[in-house]
Amino acid sequence: MAAVAAHAETIRWVAQDVPPHFSFVQGRAPQSVAELGRGEVDGFMRVLLARMPGYRHEFIEASTARYERESLRGQTLCSTLHVRTPERMKWLYFSHLYPPLASREIHVIVRRDLLPRLSDGARPQDGRLLLAELLKRPDLRPLLARDRAFGAQIDKLLAQRPVPRQSVGAQLSTQLLDMLRAGRMDYTLEYPAVVKDYLARVGEPGALVALPVAEGLSTLLATVSCSRTPEGRRHIEAIDAAVRALARDPNREAWVREWRADRAEPQDMKRLNAYMDERARGSARVE
């Protein structure tokens, strides 16, 4: 076994502190698979990587800008934290991990004191905000993380109406939410679970509010990416094969319980089972 480990190929993973989806350990990236958290993303990695015995795994604290820079230099990194975009396809291979879950729906995040300024005119009948209308408001100051993508529909809106972007490194959510809480801007975009975790850590559970947006419903499949290098191609194919093996596991209920515990919504479970059934029958999905 030690001989196998000694000659195992190493996959180097991008690590960013975005709890509860992916969490650092005492302020640093995980040092091993055993140190991975149990959130949506790192929890899935904990289950998946344990089923890749031919590989070692390292976790590298890296911003999106570094991920791109290293990939374009011919170095190989992989990530479960980056959505697929046409621009990223130029330097990354992509595959899929699992279907959209309720926790992956992007929301507008505002300070509670700003709620009265969000007029009903920005809401369709289902009560969701219209981000397209919100972006037109000169009296509200948005701020987003530089190099972050939010899915095709929101990204298209942001391309039409560019907003200020902040370089935030590998701890993107904490820095932006600190700035929002301090009044340095009026709103940002984030997952509600990330905001809830952040507010619990800073001890102000009611300071920020997550508001659903109509455009946030276009949540993408969870993706995995690797640098577009020969080594990256091998790694993405191995990861894709591991996902399909996981999908074929007859004891699916056990690994889903290990991953999601009691946090899975019934709608999420229905979607997850349909996706895994398809992955179990299908061929590789690498692009």
Image (cartoon, rainbow, N blue to C red):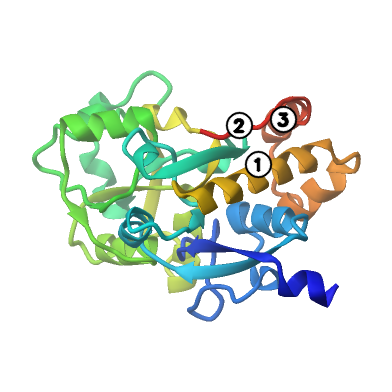
| Sequence order check, earlier mark of 2 and 1 | 1
Residue 106 pos. (x, y %)? 42, 40
Residue 4 pos. (x, y %)? 79, 69
Q: Marks 2 and 1, how far apart in space?
A: 7 Å
**Residue carrying label 2:** 285
Given the image, on which type of amino acid does mark 1 rest? Answer: Asp
- Disc number placed over residue 32 in the picture, else none: none
Please, is residue 229 above or below residue 24 in the view? above
Q: Residues within 10 Å of mark 2 (few under 14, many from 20)?
A: some
SS type, badge 3: helix
**Residue carrying label 3:** 279
**Residue carrying label 1:** 240
Q: Marks 3 and 2, how far apart in space?
A: 9 Å
Name of the residue lying farthest toward the left: 138
Tags 3 and 2 touching, CB below 8 Å? yes
Please report the residue visible at 55 percent of the width from the left and 56 percent of the height from the top. Answer: 21
Q: Residues within 10 Å of mark 3 (few under 14, many from 20)?
A: many
Residue 119: in sight, yes or no?
Answer: no
Residue 266: in sight, yes or no?
Answer: yes
Residue 50 pos. (x, y %)? 76, 60
Given the image, on which type of amino acid does mark 3 rest? Answer: Arg
